[in-house]
Amino acid sequence: MTTRPSRILQRLRAGALATSLKINLSDPRVTEIAGLSGVDGVWLCNEHVPNDWIGLENQIRAARVHDIDTLVRVSRGSYSDYIRPLEAGATGLIVPHVANADEARQIVEWTRFHPLGKRALDGGNIDGQFCLLPLEDYLHQSNTERIVVLQIESPEALEHAEAIAAVPGFDALLFGPGDFSHRLGQPGKLDAPAVVAARKRVAAAARAHGKFAMTAGLIAPFDVLIDEGYRLFNVGADVVGLASYVRQRLDVITQAADALPPGKIARSHSPYA
């Protein structure tokens, strides 16, 4: 039996950049569009989006069709909440709101097999190829080609960034600028000095301990993020892209209508415009 390596990890381990697109919509065709557009993976969300497990499994399957990775941001919960995406075939997890090294160690223990962790063993899902994959290969694949990303997004967690990064068994740190700025009482001010300093500290901690640094988007100029050590870039979100496209096309129509002679056409506007 053959196993699929992580496209994101392959690129990062080779010293290249890797990309993802955050997907809020639940239709697997959106994942297919992302794959056909050339990203290395998709970030599927179970923290802020009401995805059900069957829908999530179909999105993960759609990603495999186009040989791209899936990173599922789990909701904060139990062991089962964390391993269920892996057993559905996800390439990896993003765990939000990690507060300290003890939590990081617990996550590794739940999501990695022996000798890295204590994840319970059941190869009867797609990640174990429904018990057709030899056990040794299954364990090795899960421990080496499955990605675990820990998200730091509060001032309290930032104080433990280096200790979190030092925990063995996970792959990357993701800085959450939105929640971090919110916790500072400066929501959305991603260029505030304290937010910038936190972003730099998270990347430095990741590099110092052999972890990759992931950014939620172009929250600073690209070359600045590269200099800070970020290598896994989320390029945007489906809902933002769709809204931007619709507004851009509406602007074309609106501007053309405005150029018509008076009385040529009755005008109507969206209440949201």
Image (cartoon, rainbow, N blue to C red):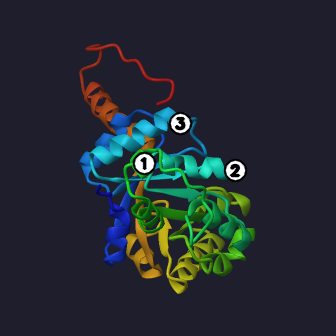
Disc on the earlier residue, 3 or 1: 3
Disc on the earlier residue, 1 or 2: 2
Q: Is residue 248 visible?
A: yes
The amino acid type found where label 3 is placed reads: Trp
SS at circle 2: loop
The amino acid type found where label 1 is placed reads: Cys
Question: 139 or 57: nearer the eye?
Answer: 139
Residue at which label 2 appears: 78
Task: Determine crowd level at label 3: few under 14, some 14-19, many 20+ residues with C-alpha closer than 10 A.
Answer: few
Q: Where 226 sits versus 150, above or below? A: below
In this picture, residue 146 sits left or right of residue 108? left
The amino acid type found where label 2 is placed reads: Ser
Question: 72 or 266: nearer the eye?
Answer: 72
Q: Is residue 189 visible?
A: no
Residue at which label 1 appears: 131
SS at circle 3: helix
Question: 23 or 46: nearer the eye?
Answer: 46
Residue at which label 3 appears: 53
Which of the 4 image quarters holds residue 231? Answer: bottom left
Q: Position of residue 48 (x, y in %)?
A: 60, 43
Front label number (3 vs 1): 1
Q: CA distance from mark 3 to mark 1?
A: 21 Å
Task: Determine crowd level at label 1: few under 14, some 14-19, many 20+ residues with C-alpha closer than 10 A.
Answer: some
Q: Position of residue 67 (x, y in %)?
A: 28, 52
Q: Position of residue 79 (x, y in %)?
A: 66, 52
In this picture, residue 215 sits left or right of residue 38? right
Disc on the earlier residue, 3 or 2: 3
Q: CA distance from mark 3 to mark 2?
A: 15 Å
Q: Where 248 sits versus 113, above or below? A: above
| Residue at point 53%, 36% (across, down) | 53
Identify the disc placed on residue 37. Answer: none
